[in-house]
Image: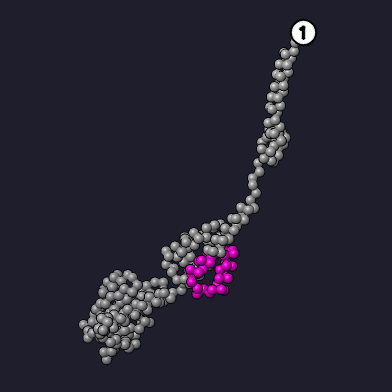
């Protein structure tokens, strides 16, 4: 029974959301390899192979994207007719498959087949990188609140934002600038729009970060200083006036008239006592006979 070697590889589906197993090439017993075009690679088109025992093993083996396996499969009459025509040409679904040149060792030590596979893997990786960037779903992964008037330490918030970008895997400046807008509110959005007009989105993230921190760090400082200047000292009612039942009066206790009067009162009593003693002594000196 004739055999063919099939190469199976895990690739991304058309919507880039799921993985599918594809048949990328077949090799005959003579060592000739034939490439299968992309549109004919999905395993769902290869009904004869799906029901073989060997494919079930391949299916359980391939788990991650870009993984591949090559296995020999015996051809029954139906499968042979699907991949070979009556003249011995390799085909599939009426499409004559292109024979690939045999691998040769290059001067760099890398075979053409290996280089082709590297380029194929690179193309797959590039395709993944071109997937639509859904900012809404990315923002949901951030563990950080929006920058509003309640945030007083702008530099600390910015450090947290950059840490979250690193954790989620956002490294490109353009993506950081795009996502940054979704965390801004009020006047910060006006600042963002002005920066966008002046520098465009294709500018350096470091410049945006520096400009933002300087703008809003200074603003917070000036607001704090303004509050301190406008803050009035707390005025406490005079306790001495309250004690004297003179009502609520606002002045320093050291300047209170009643305190001064009360301080003078003991002095006057003392003078009066001293004067009385002097008078008594003088009277005792007077001769009673006179």
Q: Nearer the viewer, residue 38 or 227?
A: 227
Residue in the image at 78% along x and 10% along y: 290
Is residue 210 part of the magenta span, yes or no?
yes
Q: What colour scheme has been applied to the protein in the rendered image?
A: one colour
Residue 261 place in picture, x, y as percent: 71, 32
Vertical relation: 19 (above or below) 85: above
Is residue 141 left or right of 45 when viewed as pictured?
right
- The residue identified by callout 1 is 289
Is residue 200 part of the magenta span, yes or no?
yes
Residue 32 place in picture, x, y as percent: 25, 86
Whether residue 78 can be seen here: no
Residue 110 place in picture, x, y as percent: 27, 81
Vertical relation: 268 (above or below) 6: above
Residue in the image at 50% along x and 73% along y: 203
Q: Nearer the viewer, residue 16 or 143?
A: 143
Q: Nearer the viewer, residue 144 or 206?
A: 206
- Look at the image and give the residue range highlighted in magenta: 183-212
Residue in the image at 55% along x and 71% along y: 195
Whether residue 288 can be seen here: yes
For disc 1, the neighbor class at 10 Å (few under 14, some 14 to 19, many from 20) is few
Is residue 68 left or right of 179 when viewed as pictured?
left
Q: Quadrant of the N terminus?
A: bottom left
Is residue 44 left or right of 230 when viewed as pictured?
left
């Amino acid at each position: 029974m004739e055999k063919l070697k099939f190469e199976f590889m895990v690739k991304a589906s058309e919507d880039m959301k799921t993985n599918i197993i594809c048949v990328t090439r077949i090799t005959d017993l003579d060592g000739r390899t034939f490439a299968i075009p992309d549109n004919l690679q999905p395993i769902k088109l290869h009904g004869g192979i799906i029901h073989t025992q060997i494919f079930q093993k391949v299916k359980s083996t391939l788990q991650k994207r870009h993984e591949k396996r090559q296995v020999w499969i015996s051809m029954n009459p139906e499968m042979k007719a699907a991949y070979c025509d009556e003249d011995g040409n390799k085909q599939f679904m009426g499409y004559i498959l292109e024979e690939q040149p045999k691998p040769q060792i290059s001067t760099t030590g890398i075979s053409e087949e290996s280089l082709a596979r590297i380029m194929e893997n690179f193309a797959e990786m590039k395709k993944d990188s071109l997937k639509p960037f859904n900012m809404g779903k990315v923002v949901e992964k951030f563990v950080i609140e929006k920058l509003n008037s309640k945030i007083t330490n702008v530099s600390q918030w910015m450090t947290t934002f950059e840490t979250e970008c690193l954790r989620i895997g956002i490294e490109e400046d353009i993506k950081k600038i795009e996502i940054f807008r979704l965390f801004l509110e009020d006047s910060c959005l006006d600042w963002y729009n002005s920066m966008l007009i002046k520098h465009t989105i294709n500018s350096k993230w470091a410049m945006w970060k520096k400009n933002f921190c300087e703008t809003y760090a200074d603003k917070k400082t000036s607001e704090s200083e303004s509050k301190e200047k406008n803050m009035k000292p707390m005025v406490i009612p005079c306790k001495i006036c309250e004690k004297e039942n003179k009502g609520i009066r606002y002045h320093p206790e050291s300047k209170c008239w009643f305190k001064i009067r009360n301080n003078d009162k003991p002095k006057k009593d003392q003078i009066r006592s001293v004067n009385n003693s002097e008078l008594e002594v003088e009277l005792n000196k007077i001769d009673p006979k006179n």
